[in-house]
Image: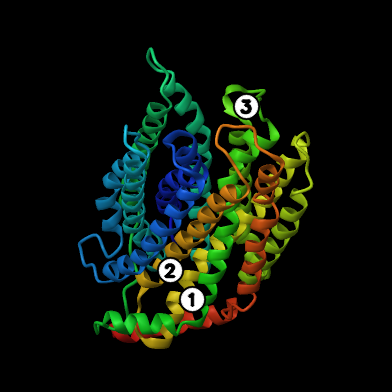
Amino acid sequence: MIRFREKVAYGFGDMSSSMFWKIFGMYLLYFYTDVFGLAPAVAGTMFLITRAWDSVIDPVIGVISDRTHSRWGKFRPYLLWGAVPFAIIGVLTFAVFDLSPTGKLIYAYVTYTLMMMVYSAVNVPYASLLGVMTADPKERTSLSSYRMFFAYLGSFISLALVEPLVNFFTNLGDTPSAARGWVCMVAVIGTLCAILFFLCFKGTKERITQISKEKSSVWEDLKDLCKNYPWWILLGAGIAALIFNSIRDGATIYYFKYYVTQSETTTPLGWMMTWSSLYLIVGQAANMLGVALAAPVANKIGKKATYVISMAVATVLSIIFYGFSADQLVWIFVFQALISICAGSIFPLLWSMYADIADYSEWKTGRRATGLIFSSSSMSQKLGWTLGGAVTGWLLGYYGFEANAVQGDEAIHGIRMMLSYLPAIGTALSVIFISFYPLSERRVKKITEELQARRVEEKA
């Protein structure tokens, strides 16, 4: 039985990751186009190239962490070693220098690539940690729920802080500077992220070791992974779900700045909170509610059924979203909450399913490659955001978007599509993938019992 304190410590890890990840997903494209000075299509292509490369790094990190041996275990050391570089490179990603257009593009490629590689070096081992903290499937779902609750809490805090901090540091001093505002904001949040990683490292424990003492080769691990049918299904479902999230998130600021509010940028809360920021915060609060509902609902009807229902409802609601006019703010926010509840409920299920797949692989092959399997979760996350971020930038360019200008009808139509029909394609694909997932609760329980029996025999 995992104690409450350890579950909270485990949640701190994704709280840290999500604070930065949400800034990248929500604000980085906007930062590149409206502050840094890149064209949207150029930024979209950069996302595709850098993230595609970084997705290849994830399995490499998984293989390395599987073969790591230290007094802290296989996966926890990476939380300790990666915390400070994670914060520092995040700050460099949002730094603005007086460079030529080509120099800016090169700088963006280099810093963003480094940021995603450091993210992998910390997040892949962190995700893998779930597979070795406990063998109990229900405890894994509980840990996943804590993880996602704190992830969304981190996103909530991050979104609540970003614009106030940017505004504060922008106007600090005699001359306002948006560049100073953004880099100082990331420095503050990056420091908090590093502290949370240290707390996660200190408060968690690795308990499960591989049954077989024989060392497997990387080639054997990769062959096992390629033959793991449930892994392929989760990979596809995860990529599709994250395309849904990344397109909606990446287009949100444009939706409010150029369609909903146009010249009016602040809410009744004043300069501290724009409509887009309030919209994103409502989404994070609703995500947290979805996470809280995931475990009890999944325990009653199963992980697969819970996932299918959530994504099917999100598909329908997203399609309806297109019909809202700019003055229908109440309905816009209500549907944001409903869609976000659905989206929030699926990710604890995905992480728990990855842990089940690690057991399934060990049960079938006699070899455990937890890091490699969990690296696919990070890889699907990167690929989903890669495709979603690239498509968002390309679509803005395709529909004729021009930064800091009044948009034409075609650009407004495109921005509205990115909050409705286009992300709905991702949820529909995710439903199709997960409908083929073969590991029921009964089968996972049987696999767990057999693995436990093997471990007892191995120790005897």
Q: Position of residue 442 (x, y in %)?
A: 59, 80
Q: Position of residue 191 (x, y in %)?
A: 33, 37
* Residue at mark 2 to residue at mark 1: CA–CA distance: 8 Å
Going by the picture, which residue comes out furthest to the top? 174
User: In the rendered view, would you say 1 is above or below 195?
Assistant: below
Which of the labelled discs sits on residue 265, or is there none?
3
Q: Quadrant of the N terminus?
A: bottom left
User: In the rendered view, would you say 58 is above or below 19?
Assistant: below
- The local secondary structure at tag 3 comes to loop
Q: Between residue 387 and residue 25, name the one nearer to us.
A: 387
Q: Are marks 2 and 1 in contact (CB under 8 Å)?
A: yes
Which of the labelled discs sits on residue 298, or is there none?
none
- The local secondary structure at tag 1 comes to helix
- The local secondary structure at tag 2 comes to helix
Q: Pointer 1: what residue?
A: 231
Q: Are marks 3 and 2 in contact (CB under 8 Å)?
A: no
* Residue at mark 3 to residue at mark 2: CA–CA distance: 39 Å
Amino acid tagged 1: Trp
Which of the labelled discs sits on residue 376, or is there none?
2
